[in-house]
Every structure is written in C-alpha cells, then in structure tokens.
Amino acid sequence: MKRRTFLKAGLATGATAVAVSAGILAPNTVLAAWNEAAFKTKTVDAGMTSVFGASNAADSADIKLKAPQIAENGAVVPIEVDATAMKGVESIAVFVSKNPVPLACTYKFSGAAVGFASVRVKMGETQDVVAVVKAGGKLFKAKSEVKVTIGGCGG
Amino acid sequence: MADISFRLKAENKGDAFEVKALFKHPMETGLRKNKATGEVYPADFINEITAKLNGTPVMVAEWSGAVSQNPFLAFRVAGKAGDKLEVTATSNKGDTGTQSADLG
C-alpha cells in the first residue's frame, strides 16, 4: 500500500512537472504544438494539404529559391527561400520531394518578420526542392532540382 | 532536460535585419540504424524555434529530422536598432535553449 502511494505520488509529480513545463513552453499566439501529422505525410501534395489545407499552388517567379545545382554533400544542402517581393507572406514550407517525408520544415511569420528563411537540409539523392509560400491567403510555389553526389541520410 | 546551445546574431541588411542562428544539435531523424547492432538511433531533433521581437512572437519554425545536423537558420525581421530579439529552440525530447540579441 505504502509503495503504491509512493509511486502514485511520484507519477503525479512527474505529470505536474510536464504540465508546468508545457505551460512555460507553450508559445503565445503564433502557433500551437508541432504539426506531427504534417511531418508524417509521404508526398509533397499530402504535405501541402496537411500544412496549408490545399495542394494546388501557382508557380511564382517572385519566390527566389536558392539551392545549389549540385550538392556535394547531401547531408547539408543550403536552401534559401526569399519571398520578400511578395506581399502578405504568412508562411513558407520547404519540401525535399523524394525524402521519406518530403515536408522538411515550415516557417510562420507575423508582425515584423518578413517572408524569408534559410536552412540546410538532408537529401538522399538528386531531386526537386519545392518551396511553397502562402501569401495573401493564396499558395505559390517554386522548385529547383538539386543534383546530389553523396546522399545525406547516413546510410 | 538538456540545454540546446546555439549562437545568435542579427545583421542590419538595410530594409530588414537578418537573424542568423547556428545550433549545436545531432538532428537525429529516428530512421538511422546502427549498422552493427541493427538498433535504431532514436529521434532527437530540434522541432520548434520561436523568435520574439520585444516580447511578441514574430516567427515560428517547425523543423523535422530532415534539417541538417548542427543546423543553421536565417530569417529576417523589419525591426529597428535596439529591438530585443529572443529565440527559443525546443527539441522532440523536450530539450530547450534560449538566446537573446539586440538588433543593430
């Protein structure tokens, strides 16, 4: 009985600690929890639907997608998405089309943050990188093929 | 819970400040296997980064294990010199790290 009480108390403390830390970590208004469902999608279209609610996006020359033509190291491929020429950029998503989960990362902007993001991603083979931008409530995209000589998934 | 360490700096680019962060993190996807034992290396990656300007969240990044090890992040804010920037990173394991910098 005593052991059970002790264990129960221990569990309760653990749960409280998690709740407290969740409270401290809970972001204020911009976003809630990590979008687990989106990071399980297996195609670019499914990922777009999961993140943005739709998968058709107009090609846009206003999205400056900078990616190397040839990536010597697929483990570290620099990708820069510059959508600052567009008005009302709300978010950017970067897809590495042949990755197990093509959705690599998303960025949501508000207030003073502008439509720009730069990151380095892992790519296992030559494929398209697709940047999807939500601006003014509409979706736009740009893509760039990156040739990969050494794959970046750690075998 | 461990600390996520990173360097943060903000550069004035004229019409906006470019904020750069360089994290120290394995960014383990959870898909990699130990070739000798067949055991999977458990997922351990930064999954969320929040940036606040003068206390207001302005950018939230959601990352997956597809982001490279010791990851780099750059974003831009149309702030002014003296604005207070605070960036917090969290991992799927609950590790966190926060750095602050003043714009300008």
Image (tube, coloured by chain):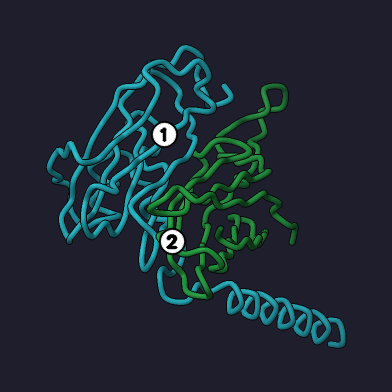
Of all chains, the one bearing label 1 is A
In this view, A60 is above or below A35: above
Going 41% across and 46% down the picture, which residue do you hit? A117
Q: What residue type is labelled 2?
A: Met
| Quadrant housing residue B26 | top right
Residue at x 17% of width, y 61% of height: A137
- Helix, strand or loop at label 1? It is strand
Instruction: Where is residue A5? Give x, y as percent.
Output: 80, 87
| Residue located farthest toward the right when viewing the structure as drawn | A2
The reply, left or right, for residue B97 in relation to residue A57 is right
State which quadrant residue B84 falls in: bottom right
Chain A appears what colour? cyan
Q: Name the residue under label 2.
A: B59
Chain B, hue in figure: green
Which quadrant is the N terminus of chain A positioned in?
bottom right
The picture quadrant where one finds residue A100 is: top left
Picture coordinates of residue B11 (x, y %)? 53, 49
- Marks 1/2 in contact by CB < 8 Å: the verdict is no
In the image, A35 versus A62, the foreground residue is A62
The residue indicated by pointer 1 is A79
- Judged left or right of residue A63, residue B87 is right
